[in-house]
Structure formats: structure tokens, C-alpha cells
Amino acid sequence: MMREIKGIIEKGIGGFYYVRTQNKDLVECKARGLFRKEGISPLAGDSVILLEGEEQSYTIHEILPRKNKLIRPPIANLDQLIIVISVCDPNPNMLVIDKLIAAAEAQKIQPILIFTKSDLQSAKNLTDVYSNVGIPYFEVSSSKKIGIEPIKSILKGKLTALTGNTGVGKSSLLNQLLPGENLETGEISRKLGRGRHTTRQVELLPVPGGGYVADTPGFSSIQLERYVPVKKEELQYCFREFIPYIDQCQFQGCSHVCEKGCAILKAIKDGKISESRHQSYCEMYEQIKEIKDWKRK
């Protein structure tokens, strides 16, 4: 009789999946062919039911219901998305940051901002923008080990992904957060499958005190409308500082771009909402408008 075992997918590569079982064993398995026929791909972060066959062979029999998923990075059941932003070198791209925040908000994932390289330059230009948004943010310096401990505490018991532009210091930050602080950045890169000739895969790495953290590839741009299917009418709710004002607009169905009697535009004028955030909203709104409904499916 086959035995059912529950576990979580830590990574998948080359058609094989590596699942951490409830007994803390890491087992290699294949997925049922039915998943492919149904157009379902198991993802890192999926809670699954395995069937144990002969000679300790395992098959993913069932993927349990997901609370969310991202297409890029391909990961499921995230609790938190940490967006790593350098205050300088490279300079922050506000539109990319706000798209990532919106992608997280649309999937009910808690966004968290980490401003790196705070020893080189003040993060005031960023904190001025995000202090009134209601999103947790931290200032750190990995090289000087400043601000690391509070981040370790928010990882416990959570499934967290780190993402951010290339060069912002994600690897240096991971070097401080993962067990064995003396690991070289190159060692972490190899552990995450980032060899020169290796395709990057999302891999969940255990953190002290329970939980997982996943590093993700660097990027220079993100198309929210491609990766998370948000309709233009829903975008306003991905900017949490907009929400108290949405029902105060003079006209129903206000797009909050340039309409007369828009409560959000008034809040911007009153200094309650950042102009930078609204500019990102307007750019995203125009981009989403161009996507036909059939392309979202």
C-alpha cells in the first residue's frame, strides 16, 4: 500500500522536485503526468502530497491549494516579498519598486522594503516617499553589519522572497541572514544555482528559527501587467495609501489620474500622498489600459 507524505517543494530542476517532508527529510521526486496535461507546474513553495512507491521512490500526487503565486519569480504561497533597494550605485528606479509593491499587494503578499548601502548615502529621499505608505522598511549596511538583526526577526516562520535590481546587494544581505555568516558570496551563489553555465532556479533556503527565504534573479524592469493580472480598476487598491480616499472622489469610477474632484489628487496636493508614488500609479495605469482582456488569460 502506498504511503501519503505531506511536504513543501524547496526547488525543482530538470523535471525533478526536491521536497522537504514533515519529518524534515529531503526527498527527490517526479510529478504526476496529469499535472502537465492540465497545464499545472509545481512551484517552489507548494505544499504537496507525495506517494511513496517501491524502493523509496516518490511522486507528487497532489498540489494543495495555493494562497498566492507569482509568475516571476515562479514561487507559491509567499508570506512576504522583500524588495531590496540600494540608495546609490545603482540609483533606485521608483517605477520598478512600485510595480513590485503592487504585484505583492495584488497577491495579498506583505511587501517589505530594505534600503541598502545606507553607510554610503542617506536614504532620506526614499524614506520621504515611503514613510506614509504603511509598508515596513529598514535601512541596512551589510558591509558594516548595521540593521541586520531586525530583518532576521521578521523572517522567522515566514516564506519570504528577496528580489531587487542587479547590484543592490541581495547576495551580501543573504550572507548576513543565512546560517554560517562566514560564507563567501560566491558560495551562496553556487548554493542557489547561479553558476556561470547554470540556469537560475528558485530555491527555498531554511532560516534560523523556522521559515524559508528565497533569492530571485536580478532584473532591470518588470511588467506588472504581464506577471500579475491586475485590471486597471483594481490597481488603485494596490496602493494602500490611496484606499482611505477612494470613496471620497466626486465621481464614481474615478481613475485618479487627472479627474476633477479626485480625492487622491487633493491628498497629493495636501502632502498626504507622495507625488512619486502617484506618478508610478499613472504610468502603470496607462500600461495596463493597453493590455486587452484576452491577453491577461
Image (cartoon, rainbow, N blue to C red):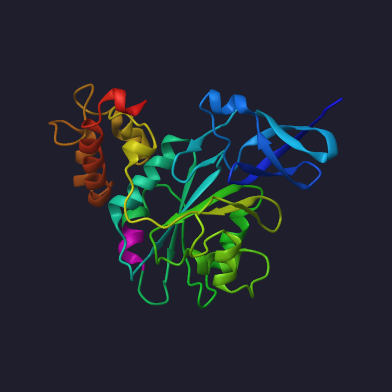
When asked about the image quadrant of residue 51, the answer is: top right
- Of helix, strand and loop, which mostly describes the magenta segment? helix
Q: In this orientation, which residue lies closer to the viewer: 203 or 17? A: 17
Q: Quadrant of the N terminus?
A: top right
- Counting from the top left corner in percent of width and height, residue 90 is at 33, 67
- Counting from the top left corner in percent of width and height, residue 161 is at 53, 50
**Does 215 appear above or below 24?**
below
Q: Residue at x 32, y 59 (%)?
A: 128
In the displayed structure image, the side of residue 114 where residue 24 appears, left or right = right
Q: Residue at x 62, y 28 (%)?
A: 33
Q: Residue at x 59, y 70 (%)?
A: 187
Is 126 included in the stretch rendered in magenta? yes
Q: In this orientation, which residue lies closer to the viewer: 165 or 192? A: 192
Q: In this orientation, which residue lies closer to the viewer: 245 or 204? A: 204
Q: Quadrant of the C terminus?
A: top left
In the displayed structure image, the side of residue 113 where residue 129 appears, left or right = left
Q: Residue at x 39, y 62 (%)?
A: 166
Q: Which residues are magenta?
A: 123-128
- Counting from the top left corner in percent of width and height, residue 22 is at 78, 41
